[in-house]
Image (tube, rainbow, N blue to C red):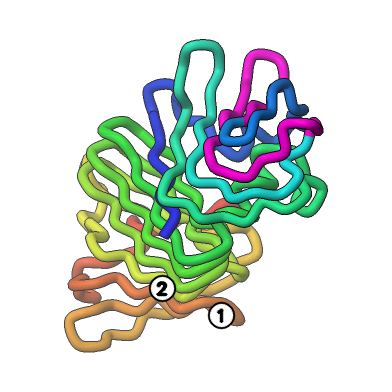
Amino acid sequence: MATLKLNAVILDGQSLADIFAVTHTFSYVAETEATMTSGATFMNFKGEGFDPNEYDFGGGTLHSMTFNSGMDLYASLSKLNFDLGEVSKFGSTGKALLESIMAGKDKVIGSKEADVLNGYAGNDLLQGMEGADKFDGGAGKDVLVGGKGSDHFLISLTSGNDVIKDFDARGGGALQDYLDLAPDVMEYRMVKRGDDLLIKITDGPTITLQDVSPSRFSDDDINWIF
């Protein structure tokens, strides 16, 4: 399970994928380490079997990588056993690399600040901490844990059947969590199942709010995004 750990102080509310959406080029390649750079931002890779004779991975296995700007660390990605192959296989932007590497069952960990947590494809675990975080599980059946703070969970027709483990339906309180319904969502209905509340999106996914009763959930817990 790949683990992506975010540094929200440096990210400052920005999406890691958006920051690294530009093309990066190889500035250094050795057998066990490589660097791709674009302006002040760069990605550092560690693994084995890289080809030091080309400005390309030339194959090899990736074990870890970091996303950086100058002396600042945006995020770190660890616990990898990723077959790189040719870089052209999945593009040369950090966003493309993330989407390829994080396509399986992965874990994204936030910080004590406000994070933007993306799940990409696969059945992921997205774990916020103490900040007011923004979650987008993407495709797959994800488990989302907001932690402390007023968190926002983006839901669209292409979202998976996600489970939110600690949704705080306070109906307007300072620590209240919100479901942010994307513009493609037209309507939803609520269904009680045991101790959980199911939010069934018409022509879309079903979101499970664990241990939330219908009496605790209202329109105040919904943000319609237009």
Crowd rating for badge 1 (residues with CA inside 10 Å; few <14, some 14–19, many 20+): few
Is 225 positioned to the left or the right of 58 in the image?
left
Answer above or below: position of 184 versus 71.
below
Answer above or below: position of 14 versus 64.
above
- Which residue is painted at 34% across and 56% down in the image? 220
Residue 191 screen position, x and y as percent = 34, 85
Of the residues under marks 2 and 1, which one precedes in the sequence? 1
Q: Which residue is mark 2?
A: 207
- Which residue is painted at 61% across and 81% down in the image? 203
Q: Is residue 108 visible?
A: yes
Proximity of marks 2 and 1: CB atoms separated by less than 8 Å: no
For badge 1, the amino acid type reads: Thr
Answer above or below: position of 129 versus 22.
below
Magenta stretch: residue 145 in it?
A: no
| Foreground of the two, 62 or 208 | 62
- Which residue is painted at 66% across and 40% down in the image? 50
Image quadrant assignment for residue 55: top right
Image quadrant assignment for residue 30: top right
- For the record, the magenta segment spans 34-55
For badge 2, the amino acid type reads: Ile
Magenta stretch: residue 43 in it?
A: yes
- Which residue is painted at 35% across and 79% down in the image? 198
Q: Which residue is mark 1?
A: 202
Residue 85 screen position, x and y as percent = 73, 53
Residue 113 screen position, x and y as percent = 31, 30
Element assignment for label 1: loop
Q: Is residue 223 visible?
A: no
Alpha-carbon span between mark 2 and mark 1: 12 Å
